[in-house]
Image (cartoon, grey):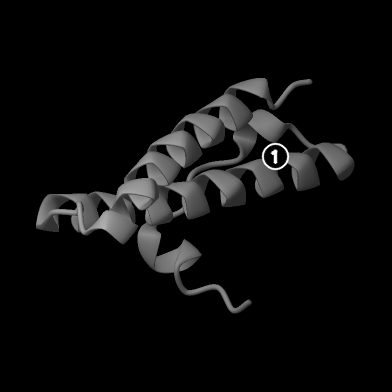
Amino acid sequence: MEDRAPLDHINELMSEEHALLERAPSGGLTDADHARLKELEVELDQCWDLLRQRRARRDAGQDPAAASVRSEGVVEGYQQ
């Protein structure tokens, strides 16, 4: 699979996010933890967007390596 590295990074970020969220019910999150959760959310959105770009470029016969990480403002502005 050509997208192994981005997927591995997504899995690492998700593991960190889940570890933080597991502490939340017991009231164990600090302000820094909340800030890190927000950072993780943005970085995960950027990673998923990059992966979608790579796959779309590959499907269109273009070079997937030409895909680039989009800014927080772009990926957080997408409509669901």
In this orientation, which residue lies closer to the viewer: 73 or 44?
Answer: 44
Figure check: 79 above or below 42: below
Point 40% across, 45% down: residue: 17
Image quarter for residue 62?
Answer: top right
Q: Residue beneath label 1, please? A: 54
Helix, strand or loop at mark 1: helix
Q: Which quarter of the figure is the C terminus placed in?
A: bottom right
- Give percent across and percent down for residue 6: 58, 30
Point 54% across, 36% down: residue: 10
Residue kind at label 1, given as amino acid type: Arg
Image quarter for residue 29?
Answer: bottom left
- Give percent across and percent down for residue 16: 39, 37
Point 53% across, 42% down: residue: 68
Check disc 1: other Cα within 10 Å, few if <14, some if 14-19, many if 20+: many
In this orientation, which residue lies closer to the viewer: 9 or 78?
Answer: 9
- Give percent across and percent down for residue 43: 41, 47
In this orientation, which residue lies closer to the viewer: 43 or 68?
Answer: 43
Q: How many marks?
A: 1
